[in-house]
Image (tube, helix red, strand yellow):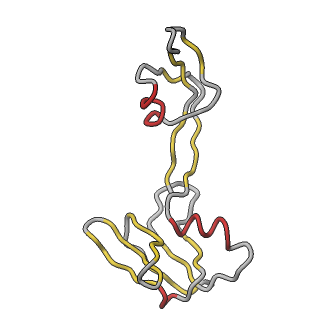
Amino acid sequence: MKVEIRYRWRVKSANGRWFNTRHAASEETIRKQHPEAVAIEGSRTEQIILDQPAELLQARLHRYKPCPSVLIWPCEIPGQNGRILLLGEPDHYTIEQVGEEWVVMQNETVLMYRGPGPVRIERAP
């Protein structure tokens, strides 16, 4: 999970006319098409982006199935608790540190998490 900062932008069209975008975009995204873009003052928004496979799975499935495990990771986003519910039993997951990143695999084949650590998996309450 990460927070993406987005703005509406003032950009130049192909014929040289300036206009405001209707949608918000991150600076990284807008600069790919419009390197001259200028952020519109007062349009800043923050969007939480689910970027881990386990988070995406949790968002889709866990409303319907019991979750016997929970992945606990060091979340630095205010208001978020750094807990991801998992479908498998705790012993179905392996945790490995690869350089600076921690990697969690399910049944040694399916990537569930790659990012900062340390992380741990516990039985869900």
Which residue appears at 62% of the width and 69% of the height?
58
At which x and y percent is residue 93? Answer: 46, 84
At which x and y percent is residue 123? Answer: 56, 87
Q: Nearer the viewer, residue 116 or 50?
A: 50
Q: Nearer the viewer, residue 19 or 49?
A: 19
Location of residue 66 by image quarter: bottom right
Q: Is residue 72 above or below residue 50?
A: below
At which x and y percent is residue 95? Answer: 38, 80
Total labels: the figure holds 0
Which residue appears at 58% of the width and 15% of the height?
19
Q: Is residue 81 above or below residue 28?
A: below
At which x and y percent is residue 71? Answer: 51, 76
Which residue, as the protein is rendered here, is positioned at the far left? Answer: 99
Q: Nearer the viewer, residue 94 or 108?
A: 108
- Give the quadrant of the C terminus: bottom right
Q: Is residue 53 above or below residue 71?
A: above
Which residue, as the protein is rendered here, is positioned at the far front? Answer: 14
Which residue, as the protein is rendered here, is positioned at the far top? Answer: 16
Image check: 66 left or right of 4? right
Which residue appears at 54% of the width and 54% of the height?
78
Which residue appears at 41% of the width and 74% of the height?
119
